[in-house]
Image (spheres, rainbow, N blue to C red):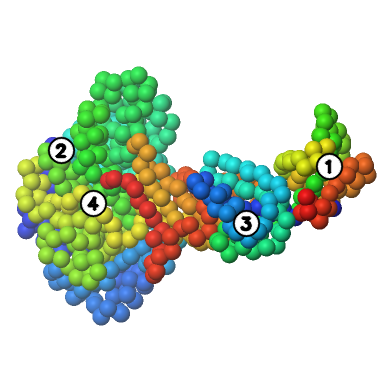
């Protein structure tokens, strides 16, 4: 139930984001979801792509610092309260969220929330037991 | 005014005779008491008796910071510790401090030299001296303090920091003499304006500024903004601390070296051969009267030249030109000596940090700032902002702990720091000094 995410270190310089997406495009790698965390000095670009291993390899070849981390992708109803319900469960279980971001699916009926938990295994147990649907890596990469 | 008329105006011939006598007895003492020096002299094939003229000093081996490091902490002291009444220290090249010691007599001489300097700058016992040099292991604060007391002036031992309070005290006490680094003097002027005060309404008339290199432009700026005379003072803790050389208020051109206590030489920066009088090169000092920690031919790495022309102030001591540069990569930031190797030392000690770094020094407004750029390798990278920010904090704190100077740490992408062939370019100094 874990999904691989790659993270790339970025200095705050113009054109860096365009460069990364260009590199991935040239290799035919598709970005499924992304988020950018930024500070005044640097940024961390987090991506879920359809070919994690290749994306990592090609970005490393181009000299980027790339890391991979496991995240959890949760499906929520795309309607008011959909996310609130999941967050309640997380709160009750006292699970720490390091960060999260969201994207919607083509169908438009469900939204996908990506969570980076401090304790990923415990989080998966709690969510599964609460009947929340988690997407597998294959499902996410194939969206 | 001259504090010690007899010595400071000694005719050159008598001065040189005195220097030779003091040099010979100093060398004999050092040879007899310090095995390290004895071994170095034996290796160079020179005995104390070989020094028959002042020029013979060039037969003796040099002493460098490396020698001090090897003998850390007290290996080069020539008296037992029970006779040492004070220790000072400054930063060395590898994080290990350079330690110096003083006997009671050394402290007395140092105090007199600082009193001479303050007098040369125009201060008298009527003055109220605001001493904003840092007190502590750094020689600046206590060195100037003892000199001001010896002069009989009123000392305000305010030390560094808390600028607003400093200005309030300076105003309320009607302080007349300011002692601090030149960059701090400009900082004070700026802060006075910010506080809605006119710096010229202070009672200040003169400032004695040192511990970092500064230009004639900076002098003009300080004199204009504070409405005072700005006097340059030179010293280094290895030799004694502040008080090795001072500009006279009459000329403000070249710093009179206290030649009855220190013998200056100028050597070629690469061959280390003595340079003809008046030529520019590396400044080398031999102490003539120090008891606890004498030094033979200590290479300061500072570039200067000697001015032998007589001076209108009547002092017969040669003058050294304002320091124009250094022969090593030492940086002086807000009065603190910083070697790139110290920064490297900190980085390597933090797991996973690669020693690809660059130091960028700038002068923002009036204060020097240092930015250390560190490349982010896979091993320290994290997808979480707080981890990376924690890392920069950690590096910042460790540098501050080691050097006593704060800096900004900036993480940069791998390979973004220029790789150079041979010696890496570690420092980009954007200050206009």
Ranked by sequence position, the earlier of labels 4 and 2 is 2
The circle on residue A75 is 1
Quadrant assignment, res B32: bottom left
Question: Residue B160 at what x, y percent from top left?
Answer: 40, 36
Label 2 marks a residue whose chain is B
Disc 4 crowd, CA 10 A, few/some/many (<14, 14-19, 20+): some
Question: Residue B11 at what x, y percent from top left?
Answer: 6, 53
Label 4 marks a residue whose chain is B
Task: Give the residue drawn at x 27%, y 40%.
Answer: B209
Q: Nearer the viewer, mark 3 or mark 2?
A: 3
Q: Which residue matches tag 3? A: A24
What is the C-alpha distance between the residues marked 3 and 2?
68 Å
What is the C-alpha distance between the residues marked 4 and 1?
69 Å
Q: Nearer the viewer, mark 3 or mark 4?
A: 3
Q: Are marks 1 and 3 on the same chain?
A: yes
Disc 1 crowd, CA 10 A, few/some/many (<14, 14-19, 20+): many
The circle on residue B323 is 4
Where disc 1 sits, the SS reads: strand
Q: Is residue B73 visible?
A: no
């Amino acid at each position: 139930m874990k999904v691989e995410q790659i993270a790339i270190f970025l200095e705050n310089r113009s054109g860096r984001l365009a460069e990364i997406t260009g590199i991935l495009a040239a290799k035919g790698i598709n970005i499924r979801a992304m988020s950018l965390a930024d500070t005044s000095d640097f940024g961390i670009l987090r991506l879920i792509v359809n070919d994690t291993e290749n994306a990592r390899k090609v970005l490393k070849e181009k000299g980027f610092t790339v890391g991979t981390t496991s995240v959890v992708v949760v499906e929520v109803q795309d309607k008011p309260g959909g996310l609130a319900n999941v967050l309640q469960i997380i709160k009750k279980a006292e699970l720490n969220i390091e960060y999260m971001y969201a994207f919607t699916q083509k169908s438009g009926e469900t939204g996908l929330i990506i969570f980076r938990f401090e304790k990923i295994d415990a989080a998966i147990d709690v969510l599964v037991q609460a009947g929340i649907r988690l997407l597998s890596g294959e499902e996410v990469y194939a969206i | 005014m001259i504090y010690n008329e007899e010595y400071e105006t000694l005719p050159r011939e008598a001065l040189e005779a005195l220097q030779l006598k003091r040099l010979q007895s100093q060398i004999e003492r050092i040879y007899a008491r310090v095995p390290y020096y004895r071994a170095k002299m034996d290796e160079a094939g020179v005995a104390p008796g070989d020094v028959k003229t002042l020029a013979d000093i060039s037969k003796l081996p040099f002493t460098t910071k490396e020698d001090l490091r090897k003998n850390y902490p007290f290996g080069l002291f020539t008296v037992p510790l029970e006779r040492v009444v004070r220790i000072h220290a400054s930063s060395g090249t590898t994080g290990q401090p350079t330690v110096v010691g003083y006997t009671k007599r050394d402290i007395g001489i140092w105090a007199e030299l600082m009193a001479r300097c303050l007098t040369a700058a125009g201060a008298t016992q009527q003055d109220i001296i605001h001493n904003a040099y840092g007190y502590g292991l750094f020689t600046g604060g206590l060195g100037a303090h003892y000199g001001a007391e010896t002069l009989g002036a009123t000392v305000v031992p305010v030390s560094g920091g808390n600028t607003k309070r400093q200005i309030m005290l300076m105003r309320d006490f009607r302080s007349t003499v300011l002692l601090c680094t030149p960059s701090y003097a400009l900082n004070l002027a700026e802060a006075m304006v910010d506080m809605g005060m006119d710096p010229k309404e202070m009672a200040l008339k003169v400032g004695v500024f040192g511990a970092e290199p500064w230009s004639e432009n900076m002098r003009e700026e300080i004199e204009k903004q504070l409405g005072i005379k700005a006097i340059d003072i030179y010293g280094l803790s290895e030799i004694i601390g502040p008080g090795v050389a001072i500009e006279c208020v009459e000329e403000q051109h070249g710093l009179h070296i206290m030649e009855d206590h220190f013998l200056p030489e100028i050597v070629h920066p690469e061959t280390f051969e003595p340079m003809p009088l008046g030529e520019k090169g590396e400044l080398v000092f031999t102490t003539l009267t120090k008891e606890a920690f004498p030094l033979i031919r200590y290479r300061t790495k500072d570039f200067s030249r000697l001015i032998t022309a007589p001076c209108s102030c009547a002092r017969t001591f040669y003058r050294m030109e304002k320091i124009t540069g250094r022969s090593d990569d030492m940086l002086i930031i807000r009065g603190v000596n910083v070697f790139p190797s110290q920064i490297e030392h900190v980085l390597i000690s933090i797991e996973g940090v690669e020693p690809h770094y660059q130091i960028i020094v700038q002068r923002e407004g009036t204060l020097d700032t240092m930015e250390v750029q560190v490349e982010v390798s896979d091993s320290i990278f994290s997808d979480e902002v707080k981890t990376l920010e924690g890392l920069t904090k950690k590096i910042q704190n460790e540098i501050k702990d080691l050097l006593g100077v704060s800096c900004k740490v900036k993480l940069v992408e791998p390979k973004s720091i220029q790789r150079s062939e041979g010696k890496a370019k570690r420092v980009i100094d954007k200050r206009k000094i």
